[in-house]
Image: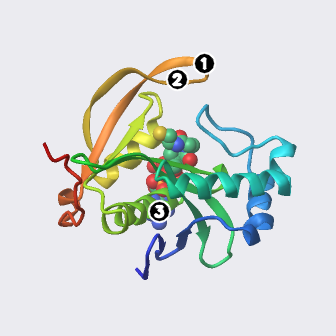
Amino acid sequence: MKKNKFARQTKRLILRPLKLSDYKIWKNSYLKSSSLQNRWDGSKKPDDQLEIQSFKKLLKYQSDQRKTENFCDYAIFDKKTGEYIGMLCLMNFVRSVTQSAFVGYSLLNQYWGLGYATEALLALIDIAFNDHKLHRIVAGIEPQNKKSIQLVKKIGFRKEGVSKKIVLLRDQWQDLVQYALTCEDVGIKWQGTTQIRVR
Ligand SMILES: CC(C)(COP(=O)(O)OP(=O)(O)OC[C@H]1O[C@@H](n2cnc3c(N)ncnc32)[C@H](O)[C@@H]1OP(=O)(O)O)[C@@H](O)C(=O)NCCC(=O)NCCS
C-alpha cells in the first residue's frame, strides 16, 4: 500500500479528500445508483444537491470541518475506472488523554457486496492510527444495521456494549452498539502525544 499522508492506495481503491475536479464522477455515481436498499442507504440525493453549487458548498464544509478535526472525510475511488464509490470519515475526535474518534462509512449501493467497504475501512484504520495518531476508533452502529455490524466484526472491532438513546436520527433518539479498535489491536504502537493539564 502506497502511503501519502491523509490519503491511501489499496489494491483496488484510492482514498483521499474530495476536490473540485471530482464533480462529474461524483455526480455520475449518484445518478447511477439503484433505489434505496435500506434506511441507512445514502445513495440518492435530491437534484438540487447534485448541482455544482451544492458540491462546492460540500467541499467548503468538508475543508472547514477537517481544519478543526470535527469531521475528516475520505472519498473512495476505483483505482482502475476512477469511479466515485462512496466515503468514510473520522469524526468526534477527542484528544487530550483519550485520543479517539468515531468512524463512519457509506458506499453508493451499486458498489455493495464487492468487498470495497472492507478494503477502504482497513485503509482508514491505517490513516487513523498512523496519520491522525489516534489511539482508539469507535463505530457506533444501529443494532438493526446488519451489514455494518458484519463489516466491523469481520475486521476485528470489539463489541463494547449498547449506548441507549445516544444519537438523534430521523427525529428519534436511537441506541447504538459500540464497536471499538485500538492501535495495539492491529499491531501499531501509539505515536501521539497528550496535552495533559498541568495542575
Ligand atoms: C455498511 C456498508 C458500507 C457495507 O458494505 P458491503 O459492500 O456490504 O461491505 P464489504 O465491503 O464488507 O462487502 C462484503 C460483501 O462483499 C462480498 N465480496 C465480494 N468480493 C469480495 C472481495 N474481493 N473481498 C471481500 N468481500 C468480497 C462479500 O462476500 C460480502 O458479501 P455479503 O454481504 O453478501 O456477505 C454498506 O452496506 C453501506 O454503505 N450501507 C449504507 C450506509 C451505512 O449503513 N453505513 C454505516 C452506518 S453505521
Name the element at disc 1: loop
How many numbered circles are shown? 3
Closest to the observer: 115 or 164?
A: 164
Label 3, ligand 1: CB separation under 8 Å: yes
Against 7, residue 197 (above or below) is above
In which quadrant of the rendered image does the N terminus lie?
A: bottom left
* Placement of 96 over or under 84, stated as above or below: above
- The residue to which callout 3 is attached is 120
Residue highlighted by disc 1: 171
Cβ–Cβ below 8 Å for labels 3 and 1? no
Q: Position of residue 12 (x, y in %)?
A: 52, 74
Task: Count neighbours of disc 1 (C-alpha within 10 A) and say few if under 14, some if 14 to 19, many if 20 or more.
Answer: few
Q: Amino acid at mark 2?
A: Leu
Comparing labels 2 and 3, the label whose residue is closer to the camera: 2
The residue under label 3 is which amino acid type?
A: Ala
Position of residue 148 relative to residue 134, above or below, is: above
Q: Residue furthest left?
A: 199
Query: Are circles 2 and 1 on residues that touch, CB within 8 Å?
Result: yes
Classed neighbour count for the residue bearing mark 3: other residues with Cα under 10 Å, few (<14), some (14–19), many (≥20)? many
